[in-house]
Amino acid sequence: PYLDDVYALQKQLYAQPGLTVLWQKDYIQTPKPTGYRSLHLGVEQTIVLPQGVRRVEVELQLRTAAMDAWADLEHKMGYKPLGQISPQLRDELKRCADAIADWMP
């Protein structure tokens, strides 16, 4: 739920045996212009399937509860036609994202 949890989980993932972190994008330290914040990790893990052992790449998005609520809202807004979202609303949503980020310990 908290910002410290995101980075604690990141540290645990880097130390996880058999898991390889391929890349990282820290949108918490450098938020997107919309205010979106999240820590993205591209990882590779060995999994066992009935057909045999296989390496699988996945993207993990680590975020606080507030960041997740924001990401959900942004995702829904992003699929509306651009003409339906005014520049004023976009600016207001960005201000809201910044205010939410300020509440995080």
Image (cartoon, rainbow, N blue to C red):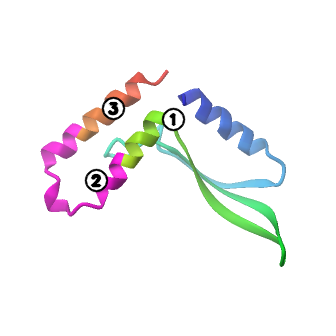
Query: Which residue is painted at 39% across and 48% down in the image?
Result: 72
Q: Tell us which disc is closer to us: 1 or 3.
A: 1
Query: Which residue is painted at 38% across and 24% down in the image?
Result: 102
> Where are the magenta residues, as a range?
73-92
Left or right side of 71 for 44 = right
Q: Which residue is mark 2?
A: 77
Q: Tell us which disc is closer to us: 2 or 3.
A: 2
Q: How many marks?
A: 3
Left or right side of 53 for 27 = left
User: Pointer 2 and pointer 3: residues touching (CB < 8 Å)?
Assistant: no
Dot 2: few (<14), some (14–19), or many (≥20) neighbours within 10 Å?
some
Quadrant including the N terminus: top right
Q: Main secondary structure of the magenta part?
A: helix
The correct choice, above or below, for 85 with respect to 57 in the image is above
Amino acid residing under circle 3: Asp
User: Pointer 1 and pointer 3: residues touching (CB < 8 Å)?
Assistant: no
Q: Which residue is mark 3?
A: 98
Within the magenta stretch, is there residue 89?
yes
Instruction: Point out residue 68 in the picture as x, y percentages from the top left corner.
Output: 46, 42
Indicate which disc residue 64 carries: 1
Instruction: Point out residue 82 in the picture as x, y percentages from the top left corner.
Output: 19, 61
Left or right side of 27 for 94 = left
Whichever of labels 1 and 2 marks the residue nearer the N terminus, that label is 1
